Image: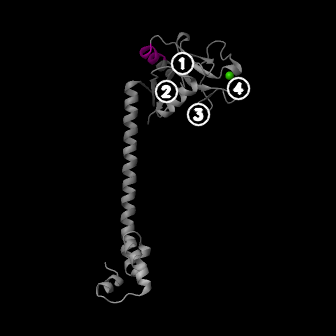
Amino acid sequence: MTSPAWGRAMLDEPLTLVEILWLPLLEAGRAQTSIWFSIGSGCGVRRGDAARTEKDDLKTQIDKLWREVNALKEIQALQTVCLRGTKAHKKCYLMSEGTKRFHEANEDCITKGGTLAIPRNNEETNILRDYGKRSVPGVSEFWLGVTDMVSEGRFVDVNGMALQYFNWDRAQPNGGKRENCVFLSQSSQGKWVDEVCRTAKRYVCEFLIP
Ligand SMILES: [Ca+2]
């Protein structure tokens, strides 16, 4: 729809000062919002609303597609991780390529979209042990996502959440304030040992899956 002002301009009728000032804005705004349009021409309100609704619908559809693409990318990444590592119930474990200090190991897992592995029961411990033996046969120790660095003696997971499952080795933990990070010991059948956090070790990241 052509605004009355444009129509008059095309007929060489003189425009008012207000129209000269508003015209470019009206025309620029016509496609954008119903507000500009309604100033230019009262009958344009409905069309502006319809255009806006259409635009909102498109935006909603694009947002939805975008979420689906991201969800697919996440599933694909998880499948890659699970194929490279091993799968437990609702999670996958992936052994590190090399060794790192606890904090760097934790950051590496987070960067990859996971956390350091937190075995929640004996079944997960056994899966971790078997996987560790298969993937790095000579390695006896790897970091878990368990620490008491925030509150001495209170071991929690790397998300700061209380643990329901502990698997301490005999006489562990015994490091006091000096040892605030926990590793799994293959030579002690998957039992936990507290250790100085800046020690470099292999580590396992875990990734939760839907
Ligand atoms: Ca400690």
User: Between residues 106 and 80, which one lies in front from this camera angle?
Assistant: 106
- Asked if the residue at label 4 sits under 8 Å from ligand 1, the reply is yes
Task: Tell me where residue 45 appears, x and y as whole percent.
Answer: 40, 77
- The type of colouring in the image is one colour
Magenta span includes 132: yes
Q: Residues within 10 Å of mark 1 (few under 14, many from 20)?
A: many
Quadrant of the frame with the C terminus: top left
Residue at the spot 37% in from the left edge and 78% down from the top edge: 44
- Residue underneath mark 4: 152
Q: Along the horizontal axis of the image, is 198 left or right of 72? A: right
The vertical placement of 101 against 53, above or below, is above
Magenta span: 129-136
User: Between residues 1 and 72, which one lies in front from this camera angle?
Assistant: 1
Per the model, the C-alpha gap separating discs 2 and 3 is 13 Å
- Residue underneath mark 1: 201
Task: Tell me where residue 38 appears, x and y as whole percent.
Answer: 42, 78
Indicate the secondary structure of the residue bearing disc 3: loop
Per the model, the C-alpha gap separating discs 3 and 4 is 16 Å
